[in-house]
Image: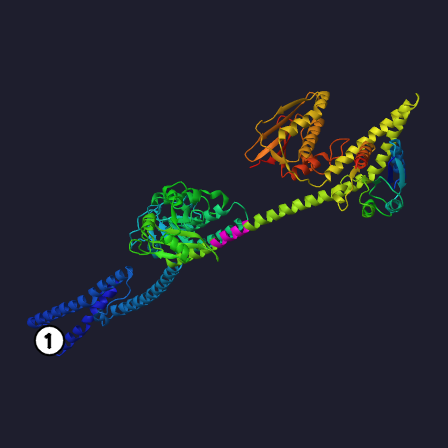
């Protein structure tokens, strides 16, 4: 069972995504900001991180950098309400970019896609 | 009186009677003796005879003399010869004569001194008349000249009394209506008249501009008319030149004025009022042809035409630069002379006089073209006149061309001051042309900068809108996706749950639907703030139109709107972003459908112009008001109740990114047309 770290500062959203992803059959760990996410990545092993961008304490971009500088191989999906994040945040590269939507099909399919290619490797 | 005279007469016999009485008393003369008596009578008779001779001498002649004197007086001659001294001795007439003589001398002195006064005045008047610029003529009631002052005769080239008996129309080519009317008026009413700025050209080819005063006098019962011409030609010329120069410098403020400046220059040189040349030609340097080419010419073909033009100018108050007298240069624009000039060209590497003046940058005055070695055969043939001037048009740093001027028709000599004036004028005109050129250049650059600035402002505005939009969108999207996400979850839960929960499912579905709609709006906002993409592919615009049409095919049917596709089959491919252009057509098509009532028609057309390739979307809707037209592309402007106001802003942004243009026109038959015009690939 793949273990996913869900980083999202808004509780309501986090719970929604967690419930949906659990329904999909993933094991979910949660973090409410970038700092906590970096800590969790240090002490745990995750198959994938879903990372929001705008968060208090440490935002998603900084967290992305810290996580990747520690473990370059860990897949990260940026999940944000910004739709032009791609051009704005190019310093670090994530594996996928998904714009937040009430319809989580895109997020789910991206995660599935990434995890399946990982497992093959 | 007669008795008195007779007694006076007889008194002279008294001495004889006394003598006889003494002779008789002393017996010398014996009265009784007949011989004594006879001698006495003879003596007496002789005595009477002698006496009467004396009387005749002393008495009859003085009467004649006095009569003569009085007759002389009557004739106005008051001095008399001194040959009356014989009379002095005469007792009674000497005194009278002396009196007459002194009276005569007095009158003589009196008249003599008055004549001196009159002569003095006359001299004074003559001097005044001669010294002034005024020309006088006096006309009788039959309009014949009965007097002209020296200035008049001299100025209009008449010798002595040659002018007397002529009429004004014998002296001048054209008597302007204003002048003949004024003379008629003075004749009828007797009031003096003053006319300003009357232009006259004499048959002996003297032209002038004059202020004219006409007044009536009555001399010895006959009515006469004094016509005084004040020559204001040079004053007028100066005024004219000043106004011309100021008008030229004013006119260079405007864009399309170089032609006008050139016209004005030549008009100033000719027309007898500016510099007074008969003809003027302008040659400008043509960089492409590497030659001085004829640009313009003002001047008649013949003296007759010169006179006609002169007459035509009369009625225009001599304001040659005004807007309503374009006729002055154009009057000669169609003639042979004009054609000859504008078809002439002198190569810049030739040894033509014109080219030499152009290069030498100083004026040349040719007195005798046939003998002057500076005149090349071509120029000689071209000008066909012995005396002319060539003046360069040059500003501080470059030569622009030359002006050629002559007096072909009246053959008047060209004076140095005219050449000088022409040179000054030419240099001022050159400055004007030069500054016009610089000004145009500056204007052009200014416009360029302004356009850039506007573009920058526009893009800054767009960028700002984009940033704000992105921020707002982000802030809204977060709660929105939460709401939508939970609604979706409720919906899914309800689907699995037992019956009786349909109402909850319906409510959840509404929430989900609405939040999805909001998300779509947010996507539009995001599209708008998205940076320009790299356009790499070559696309067929017909495919863009067809793809979009198929997307909306059902909506056409739903709304009962007839789609018409007019696609040009031979369209070149255009470098573009397919999806973005689809977005453009989609937005425009949706707008068109919203504007078109049921039963309407929307035409989608593609095609080519010489420079552009276009997509046109034409509807049969309500059209666009001017007010709306101004704001139609502003972000967040909308005329729809549910619209966000970004559809057209997005369209504009995408079309701009493609270096294209959007042209909106209201159709005359109603509705409007949006035309997307992209540059045609070369």
Residue B433 painted magenta: yes
**What is the quadrant of residue B358 in the picture?**
bottom left
Report the magenta residues as a range: B430-440
Front-most of residues B672 and B138: B672
Q: Is residue A69 left or right of residue B370?
A: right
Its colouring scheme is rainbow
Q: Which residue lies furthest to the front in this view?
A: A121
Q: Position of residue B175 (x, y in %)?
A: 38, 45
Rendered residue at 60%/49% (across/down): B446
Q: In this view, does B179 lie to the left or right of B661?
A: left
Front-most of residues B457 and B353: B457
Q: Residue tagged by mark 1? A: B29
- Quarter placement of the N terminus of chain B: bottom left
Q: Where is residue B4 in the image (x, y as percent from the top left)?
A: 25, 65
Front-most of residues B526 and B353: B526
Above or below: residue B3 compared with residue B641: below
Secondary structure of the residue carrying numbered label 1: loop
Q: Is residue A64 left or right of residue B82?
A: right
Q: In this view, does B181 lie to the left or right of A108?
A: left
Query: Overall secondary structure of the magenta stretch?
Result: helix
Rendered residue at 89%/40% (across/down): A30
* Residue B389 visible: yes
**What is the quadrant of residue B635 in the picture?**
top right
Chain of the residue displaying label 1: B
Badge 1, how many Cα within 10 Å: few under 14, some, many 20+?
some
* Residue B621 visible: no
Q: Position of residue B160 (x, y in %)?
A: 29, 55
Residue B133 painted magenta: no
- Quarter placement of the C terminus of chain B: top right
Above or below: residue B642 compared with residue B122: above
């Amino acid at each position: 069972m793949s273990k996913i770290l869900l980083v999202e500062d808004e509780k309501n959203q986090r719970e929604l995504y967690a419930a949906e992803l659990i329904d999909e059959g993933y094991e979910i760990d949660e973090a409410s900001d970038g700092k906590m996410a970096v800590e969790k990545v240090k002490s745990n092993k995750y198959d994938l991180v879903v990372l929001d961008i705008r968060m208090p304490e440490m935002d998603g971009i900084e967290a992305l950098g810290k996580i990747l500088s520690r473990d370059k191989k860990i897949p990260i999906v940026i999940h944000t309400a910004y739709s032009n994040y791609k051009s704005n945040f190019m310093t670090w590269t994530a594996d996928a970019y998904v714009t937040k939507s009430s319809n989580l099909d895109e997020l789910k399919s991206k995660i599935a896609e990434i995890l399946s290619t990982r497992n093959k490797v | 009186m007669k008795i008195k005279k007779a007694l006076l007469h007889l008194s002279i016999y008294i001495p004889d009677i006394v003598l006889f009485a003494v002779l008789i008393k002393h017996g010398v003369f014996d009265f009784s003796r007949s011989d004594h008596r006879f001698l006495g009578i003879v003596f007496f008779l002789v005595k009477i005879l002698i006496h009467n001779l004396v009387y005749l001498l002393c008495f009859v002649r003085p009467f004649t003399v006095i009569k003569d004197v009085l007759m002389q007086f009557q004739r106005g001659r008051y001095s008399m010869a001194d040959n009356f001294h014989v009379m002095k001795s005469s007792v009674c007439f000497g005194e009278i004569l002396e009196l007459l003589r002194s009276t005569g001398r007095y009158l003589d002195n009196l008249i003599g001194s008055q004549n001196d006064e009159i002569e003095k005045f006359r001299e004074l008047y003559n001097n005044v008349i001669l010294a002034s610029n005024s020309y006088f003529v006096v006309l009788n009631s039959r309009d014949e000249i009965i007097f002209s002052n020296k200035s008049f005769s001299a100025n209009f080239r008449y010798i002595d009394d040659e002018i007397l008996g002529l009429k004004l129309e014998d002296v001048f080519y054209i008597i302007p209506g204003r002048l003949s009317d004024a003379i008629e008026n003075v004749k009828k009413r007797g009031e003096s008249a003053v006319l300003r700025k009357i232009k006259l050209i004499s048959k002996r080819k003297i032209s002038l501009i004059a202020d004219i005063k006409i007044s009536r006098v009555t001399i010895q019962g006959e009515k006469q008319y004094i016509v005084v011409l004040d020559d204001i030609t040079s004053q007028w010329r100066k005024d004219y030149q000043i106004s011309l120069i100021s008008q030229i410098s004013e006119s260079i403020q405007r864009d399309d004025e170089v032609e006008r400046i050139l016209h004005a220059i030549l008009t100033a040189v000719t027309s007898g009022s500016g510099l007074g040349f008969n003809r003027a030609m302008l040659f400008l340097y043509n960089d492409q042809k590497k030659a001085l080419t004829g640009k313009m010419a003002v001047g008649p073909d013949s003296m007759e035409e010169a006179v006609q033009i002169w007459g035509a100018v009369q009625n225009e108050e001599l304001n040659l630069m005004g807007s309503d007298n374009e006729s002055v240069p154009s009057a000669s624009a169609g003639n042979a002379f004009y054609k000859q000039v504008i078809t002439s060209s002198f190569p810049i590497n030739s040894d033509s006089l014109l080219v030499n003046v152009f290069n030498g940058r100083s004026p040349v005055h040719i007195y005798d073209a046939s003998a002057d070695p500076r005149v090349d055969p071509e120029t000689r043939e071209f000008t066909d006149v012995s005396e002319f001037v060539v003046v360069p048009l040059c500003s501080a740093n470059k030569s622009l061309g030359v002006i050629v001027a002559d007096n072909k028709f009246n053959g008047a000599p060209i004076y140095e001051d005219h050449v000088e004036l022409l040179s000054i004028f030419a240099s001022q005109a050159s400055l004007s042309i030069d500054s016009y050129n610089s000004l145009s250049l500056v204007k052009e650059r200014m416009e360029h900068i302004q356009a850039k600035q506007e573009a920058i402002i526009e893009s800054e505005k767009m960028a700002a809108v984009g940033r704000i939009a992105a921020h707002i969108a982000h802030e809204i999207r977060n709660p929105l996706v939460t709401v939508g996400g939970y609604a979706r979850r409720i919906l899914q839960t309800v689907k699995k749950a037992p019956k009786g929960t349909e109402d909850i499912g319906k409510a959840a579905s509404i929430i989900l639907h609405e939040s999805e709609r909001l998300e779509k709006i947010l996507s539009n906002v995001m599209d708008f703030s998205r940076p320009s993409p790299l356009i790499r592919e070559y696309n067929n615009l017909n495919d863009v139109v067809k793809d979009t049409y198929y997307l909306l095919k059902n909506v056409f049917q739903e709304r009962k709107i007839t789609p018409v596709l007019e696609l040009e089959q031979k369209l070149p491919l255009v470098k573009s972003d397919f999806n973005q252009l689809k977005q453009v057509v989609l937005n425009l098509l949706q707008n068109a459908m919203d504007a078109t009532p049921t039963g309407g028609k929307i035409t989608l057309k593609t095609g080519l112009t010489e420079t552009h390739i276009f997509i046109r979307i034409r509807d049969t809707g309500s059209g666009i008001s001017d007010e709306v037209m101004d704001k139609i592309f502003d972000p967040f402007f909308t005329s729809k109740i549910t619209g966000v106001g970004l559809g057209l802003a997005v369209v504009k942004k995408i079309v701009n990114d493609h270096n294209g243009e959007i042209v909106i026109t209201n159709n005359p038959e109603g509705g409007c047309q949006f035309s997307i015009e992209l540059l045609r690939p070369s």
